[in-house]
Image (cartoon, rainbow, N blue to C red):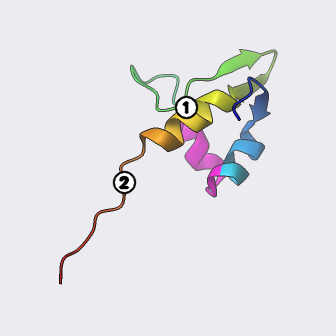
């Protein structure tokens, strides 16, 4: 179930199993098409939980190798 909770960068990194720097690359605000949309509230950058779900669902499926 998807909620519209806002998550900190650290929480997003844990959920995706990547480092904090990788999350910042995904939300690159200087890019015309960031892979994750984020919002800035005060000095904090937050990401909607639904954005993370969308990102995961849009990842390419694993390729199968035929023997």
Q: Is residue 22 magenta?
A: yes
Q: Could you tell me residue 14's position as x and y percent?
A: 72, 53
Farthest bottom residue? 67
Q: Give the residue displayed 71% in from the left and 17% down from the top.
A: 40
Quadrant of the rendered structure where residue 52 is? Answer: top right
Magenta segment range? Answer: 16-27
Badge 1 element: loop
In the rendered view of the protein, which quadrant contains the N terminus? top right
Q: Could you tell me residue 18's position as x and y percent?
A: 61, 56
Q: Give the residue displayed 78% in from the left and 26% down from the top.
A: 5
In the rendered view of the protein, which quadrant contains the C terminus? bottom left
Farthest right residue? 42
Q: As drawn, is 49 to the left or to the right of 26?
A: right
Residue occupied by mark 2: 61
Q: Nearer the viewer, mark 1 or mark 2?
A: 2
Q: Earlier in the sequence, mark 1 or mark 2?
A: 1
Farthest left residue? 67
Image position of 33 with respect to 67: above or below:
above
Q: Give the residue displayed 18% in from the left and 77% down from the top.
A: 66
Residue occupied by mark 1: 27
- The Cα atoms of the two marked residues, 1 and 2, are separated by 22 Å
Farthest front residue? 1
Badge 2 element: loop
């Amino acid at each position: 179930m998807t909620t519209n909770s806002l998550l900190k960068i650290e929480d997003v990194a844990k959920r995706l199993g990547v480092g904090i720097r990788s999350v910042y690359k995904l939300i690159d605000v200087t890019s015309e098409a960031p892979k994750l949309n984020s919002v800035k509230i005060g000095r904090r950058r937050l990401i909607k939980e639904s954005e993370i779900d969308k990102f995961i669902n849009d990842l390419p499926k694993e390729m199968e190798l035929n023997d």
